Image (cartoon, grey):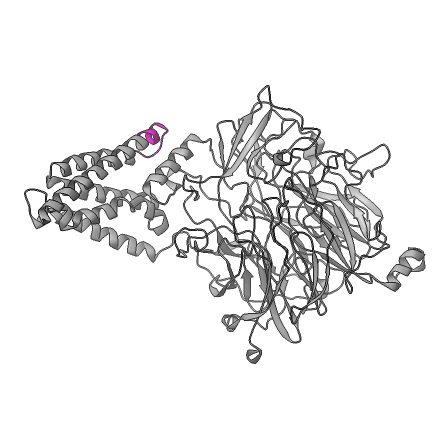
């Protein structure tokens, strides 16, 4: 009976080897023709021979398979080193099959029969176990280091950002100050006690997805805190005022957002606060009466249907003297006013006189879309004070009966930064849409695209501009609020710096007075050969402070759950056009790495101005950009009545009306839906700002919520959102595709504490003090295209009352 079963299993195993061998030989041959690794052909042919020997029940099958296993192990280490997650798919078919062959009831039918037949294969398997076990203890992608602990001379009153010093217990702006540092001077929570954090209160907004909402509904809000009140917005732009100590609702405002599935986004990253000073008589009787009666403290809410609303921070009622009964219509003066094509998704900047707002436009729909104009409105009356329209030869021209803002001016969709002392606003700019083909862009449209634009906050006049990408064909806009920091040199002079993290992985460091580089970013030659009718800039700036990959990807960097889908990813990779960063979009299909999502997204950096260090969470996911030639029966101009299905999200086929090409944009994924590039895909990192060097970097996040297996493997996963940093030496970050909030030792990057979140935390947390207790608050509502669990949670953490 035993012998009969052994004969049957031997035959079945022989068929498996032959089938596997044929697949590897065929796929490997294709890969070899494309110029990739020839290993799969050799392995596949050897497996076919092994299968034939097994069918004939020859002991040489075990010897040959031992050679296959040894060759696979040697090749794997030679290609991937001792990175366990890179090794895993190379051996996860061959080595388990080898273990199967070692079993007596499988190989017992082989002749001549001898226990020594199994020794070579057993030896290889034991060595493989040792190699993989050793690899589990290593991480070649990890950089260990220690950030400086020493503090520098520091004066809160002289910090860039707000006109007055910010109370230590508050978080009154999106980045705490308008300098975008995301730093709190609170130190009640430290590296020694952070592991004692517990949920202090939870609030639910009850703002969930509706039937008319787009797929890209996201909860990216960072609350602000002033006095004893927390203010925040939800995806449908509901505004909530909560008691900071208890999370109890004080008031709620519903702007009655008008939305439909054609919106490319449905999100609100936050609101802005302004305490309006007493007015002089020259400011106008109506405004004076308004201030006297209400609205001495204001909340400014941008809405995705194109409005800016002013609310009384104490009551949640609209400020009637602002605009038209509390509302400014941001579509006024726009060259096209289709609902959803202009979406302010980020909180505005406020000075002591004006509120300054920019907005997102629908990407890749057409060459005739709303303007990316930035506008300043009077803080009290809502009257338009100035405009900066980047696509207009005269960018400060105001709209009139004969003039509208310029279609497709480069826009700014994320929060700007502000230096009250210099009275300069720093605007991260994007590119004139469509993003992926620029043959029809004018020199004027490109003049202020994809860079940092510094304007006088009182007049809107340009002070300087620095371009981070020339003739951007990859959607490599500046995606995050810049961080402003002052460096005190040995002679006592202060250098006012600006740090701008870019999607390319570069961090551009500029003197914020004049836009001059403080860290070199030399121009380097980049791949040429644009699509028909377009061109490519011959060079691009490459900052010497950067997270961009040191080397170009190869087919050896491709990944999979098994060696089979890894082989498919290798073939897919070799079929794409890829010559390194800034490879032009193509009809063939171009691998874009860093991808369209960027190495940095809207979360930006967290900067400690006292220790002069930064905390970052870069990501590494390639995308594929494939231009689709427009056929004669395709429309060149958009429909006069908007097709709701044509806009929607930012992935998939985009029409790019007005150009010769549509474009298909997608993450570079395997047939199983996992990234084709081997992990890590997400990291945390510490930057020494005095030397502008990356001191430490570690993989961040696990597969717990993105894998079909109920395990949390720490491979390093993508994140959408940003970190904060505190004087207690602790940084906090949610944002990963697994549902956790984590606390890190800023000095080393070590995870000190984590807690499970009720939904996806694709937001930036914040911290404040109330009644002598420090709280850390996170918004957990999930993210549409990121695929995380939706929710409506606001969760506050604090130390137990007895431990502080």
Q: Do we see residue 246 in this rendering?
A: yes
Residue projecting furthest to the bottom: 802
Q: Report the side of 751 relative to 92 (left or right).
A: right
Q: Which residue is drawn at 85% across and 32% down?
A: 402
Q: Residue at x 58, y 48 (%)?
A: 601
Q: Depth check: 585 or 96 in front?
A: 96
Task: Please state the extent of the stretch shown in magenta in the rendering.
Answer: 29-38
Measured from the top left, where is residue 387 in percent x and y? Answer: 79, 43
Q: Report the side of 19 relative to 340 (left or right).
A: left
Q: Do we see residue 612 in this rendering?
A: no
Measured from the top left, where is residue 188 in percent x and y? Answer: 59, 73
Q: Residue at x 48, y 51 (%)?
A: 682
**How many numbered marks have been drawn onto this rendered protein structure?**
0
Q: Depth check: 263 or 764 in front?
A: 263
Q: Depth check: 348 or 351 in front?
A: 348
Measured from the top left, where is residue 483 in percent x and y? Answer: 64, 54
Residue projecting furthest to the top: 632
Work out which quarter of the rendered image holds the C terminus and state it. bottom right
Q: Is residue 37 magenta?
A: yes
Measured from the top left, where is residue 79 in percent x and y? Answer: 33, 43
Up the image or down, 461 lies above or below 296; here it is above
Q: Report the side of 423 relative to 688 (left or right).
A: right
Q: Does the magenta stretch include residue 125?
A: no
Which image quarter: residue 66?
top left
């Amino acid at each position: 009976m035993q012998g009969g079963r052994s004969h049957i299993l031997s035959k079945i195993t022989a068929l498996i080897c032959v089938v596997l061998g044929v697949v590897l030989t065929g796929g490997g041959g294709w890969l070899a023709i494309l110029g990739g690794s020839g290993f799969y052909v050799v392995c596949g042919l050897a497996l076919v021979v092994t299968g034939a020997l097994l069918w004939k029940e020859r002991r040489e099958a075990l010897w040959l398979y031992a050679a296959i296993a040894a060759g696979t192990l040697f090749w794997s280490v030679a290609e991937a080193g001792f990175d366990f997650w890179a090794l895993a798919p190379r051996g996860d078919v061959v080595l388990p099959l080898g273990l199967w062959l070692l079993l007596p009831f499988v190989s017992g039918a082989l002749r001549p029969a001898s226990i020594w037949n199994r020794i070579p294969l057993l030896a290889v398997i034991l060595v493989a176990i040792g190699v993989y076990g050793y690899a589990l203890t290593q991480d070649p992608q990890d950089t260990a280091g220690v950030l400086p602990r020493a503090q520098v001379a520091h004066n809160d009153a002289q910090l860039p950002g707000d006109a007055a010093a910010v109370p230590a217990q508050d978080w009154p702006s999106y980045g705490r100050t308008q300098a975008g540092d995301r730093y709190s001077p609170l130190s009640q929570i430290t590296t020694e006690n952070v592991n004692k954090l517990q949920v202090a209160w939870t609030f639910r907004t009850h703002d969930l997805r509706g039937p008319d909402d787009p797929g890209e509904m996201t909860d990216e809000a960072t609350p602000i805190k002033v006095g004893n009140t927390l203010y925040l917005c939800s995806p449908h732009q509901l505004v909530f005022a909560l008691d900071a100590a208890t999370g109890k609702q004080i008031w709620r405002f519903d702007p009655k957002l008008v939305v439909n599935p054609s919106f490319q986004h449905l999100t609100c990253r936050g609101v802005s606060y302004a305490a309006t000073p007493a007015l002089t008589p020259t400011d106008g009787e109506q405004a004076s009466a308004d201030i006297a009666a209400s609205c001495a403290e204001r909340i400014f809410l941008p809405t995705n249907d194109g409005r800016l609303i002013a609310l009384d921070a104490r009551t949640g009622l609209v400020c009637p003297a602002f605009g038209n009964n509390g509302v400014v219509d941001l579509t006024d003066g726009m060259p096209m006013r289709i609902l959803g094509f202009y979406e302010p998704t980020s909180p505005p900047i406020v000075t002591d006189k004006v509120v300054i707002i920019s907005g997102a436009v629908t990407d890749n729909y057409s060459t005739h879309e709303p303007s990316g104009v930035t506008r300043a409105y009077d803080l009290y009356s809502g009257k338009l004070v100035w405009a900066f329209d980047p696509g207009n030869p005269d960018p400060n021209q105001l709209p009139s009966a004969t003039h509208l803002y310029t279609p497709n001016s480069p826009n700014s969709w994320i929060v700007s930064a502000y230096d009250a002392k210099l009275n300069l606003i720093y605007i991260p700019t994007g590119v004139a849409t469509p993003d992926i083909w620029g043959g029809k862009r004018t020199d004027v449209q490109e003049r202020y695209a994809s860079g940092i634009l510094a304007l006088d906050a009182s007049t809107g006049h340009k002070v300087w501009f620095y371009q981070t990408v020339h003739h951007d064909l990859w959607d490599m806009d500046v995606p995050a609020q810049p961080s402003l920091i002052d460096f005190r040199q040995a002679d006592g002079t202060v250098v006012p710096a600006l740090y701008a993290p870019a999607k390319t992985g570069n961090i551009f460091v500029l003197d914020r007075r004049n836009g001059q580089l403080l860290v070199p970013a030399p121009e380097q030659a980049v791949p040429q050969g644009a699509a028909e009718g377009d061109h490519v800039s011959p060079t691009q700036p490459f900052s010497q402070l950067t997270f961009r990959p040191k080397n170009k990807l190869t087919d050896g960097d491709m990944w999979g759950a098994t060696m089979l889908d890894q082989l498919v990813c290798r073939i897919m990779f070799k079929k794409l056009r890829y010559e390194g960063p800034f490879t032009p979009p193509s009809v063939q299909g171009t691998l874009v790495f860093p991808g369209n999502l960027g190495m940095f997204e809207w979360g930006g950096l967290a900067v400690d101005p006292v220790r002069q260090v930064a905390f970052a969470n870069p990501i590494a996911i390639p995308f594929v950009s494939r231009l689709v030639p427009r056929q004669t029966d395709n429309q060149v101009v958009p429909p006069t009545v908007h097709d709701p299905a044509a806009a929607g999200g930012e992935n998939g086929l985009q029409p790019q009306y007005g150009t010769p090409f549509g474009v298909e944009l997608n993450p570079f994924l395997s047939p199983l839906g996992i990234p084709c590039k081997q992990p890590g895909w997400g990291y945390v990192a510490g930057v020494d700002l005095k030397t502008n060097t990356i001191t430490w970097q570690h993989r961040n996040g696990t597969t717990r919520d993105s894998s079909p297996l109920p395990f949390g493997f720490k491979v390093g996963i993508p994140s959408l959102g940003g970190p904060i940093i505190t004087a207690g030496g602790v940084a906090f970050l949610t944002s990963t595709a697994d549902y956790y909030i984590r606390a890190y030792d800023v000095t080393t990057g070590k995870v000190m504490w984590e807690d499970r979140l009720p939904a996806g935390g694709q937001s930036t947390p914040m911290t404040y003090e109330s009644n002598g207790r420090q709280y850390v608050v996170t918004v957990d509502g999930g993210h549409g295209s990121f695929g995380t669990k939706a929710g409506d949670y606001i969760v506050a953490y604090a130390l137990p009352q007895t431990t502080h």
